[in-house]
Image (cartoon, rainbow, N blue to C red):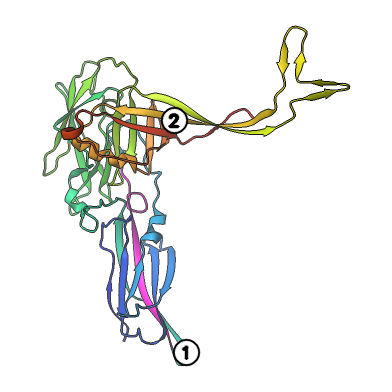
Amino acid sequence: MSITNATFPLDYTSIQDQLWVVVESDNYEQVNFKYIIDVYNNDTNQQLIRAKIYPDVTSGMGYFDVGSVVRNCMTYNWFFPYDSIGVNVPDIYGQIGFQYRIELGEEYNVGASGIQEINITNNTTISLNYTPTVDDRKLFDISDYTNKYLTTRELPDSITLRREEPFFIGFLGDFAGAAEVSYYVETSGDDYDSSSSSASRFHQFNIGPAAVAAETGIIYSNTEWYDIIIPNPDGKTIRVYIDDCPTLHDPYYLVFMNRFGMFDTAAFKCVSKFNMTVGRKAYETKEAKFDGLDVNYYTDSGFIKRWNESKVNYAQTIDWNYKLTMDYPTDADYRWLSELVYSPQVYLKIGGDYFPVTIKNTNYEESKRIYAGLKTFEIEVERNTKLNGFRR
């Protein structure tokens, strides 16, 4: 008699949720019985953990959540905001997901002898780096997005972008078919096509005018629009109109990881404000300076007096912050922007560079036009770089 039943996490479930292993054995009534759960990185065969758990007192089954183990294997440095259409292709070995192997065994005593059996049964699983919502936890199936864009933002048939504006968007290729995604760019005079391959089938695109121009060379100063076409069963085509009108305010763009583990772009084109927060460390000193029989509170040059200080600011730190405003999002965009508030990785585009920032807002409230009318969306970000001021 040995392990009789076991259930493992399903493929493509969220790695950010609980991932339960349930195991049952006929031996659970043996002395000092424990289930053995070994978790391995399936790519490198590195053992991540060996857990020994006692059976449930009622059912005799073993329950273990491997989510806390495999989540630590995720990396978040795969994304780089290139000016090209096919920006990144994250893999399933720690970037967009993680492939791991679970081996089950058991340990118990018979008389004075200890018995241990490992790898009685095993299973290999791929969990993906996305987050469920409160409405679809354990119900959401990412395969529903096969051959679709990996975003919850509202994607109309046409959008308007400035020439320097990035527009990052993820795409999921076919799990069952070939791992190749083709895309086409068409304008009124030229067209371009390309393709990219990925074992993970996740593709990160940038369809902004600068990225399309850098890769294809068919976006000119007089180009008014272009189409991005990714052949798939839905046949979704996005027409991009290029906006060359001057602006009253410098636009800012936030590139952030959305709920699917891919990257979206939020444009803030209304008035934005820069501010900084200064932290100071100080110590107290005597204001009076003794000079023989004199007690001086200032130094007299004969023309002006420089007064002494009793508080010395000896160290400063500087935090850089931006208050950004988006012009009247739709109801659907307001809902989508909640993902920006809880995003773990956000970049602010300033000039041609991308700077890591932290969203300072900790509260989010959905707004709908039926009761709030036209309402801007405001957010405050903090640069993830702290500078030192003068040290005295």
Q: Nearer the viewer, residue 108 or 224?
A: 108
Q: Indicate whether 192 appears above or below 99.
A: above
Q: Which amino acid does label 1 sit on?
A: Ser
The magenta span reads 89-109
Q: Position of residue 202 (x, y in %)?
A: 26, 46
Q: Where is residue 43 in the image (x, y as percent from the top left)?
A: 37, 59
At 25% across and 52% down in the image, what residue appears? Answer: 134
Q: Which of marks 2 and 1 is in front?
A: 2
Q: Kindly identify which residue carries mark 2.
A: 321
Quarter where residue 388 is shown: top right
Residue 149 visible in the displayed image: yes
Q: Position of residue 316 (x, y in %)?
A: 59, 31
Q: Kindly identify which residue carries mark 1.
A: 113
Q: Is residue 7 left or right of residue 52?
A: left
At 15% across and 34% down in the image, what residue appears? Answer: 370
Residue 118 visible in the displayed image: no
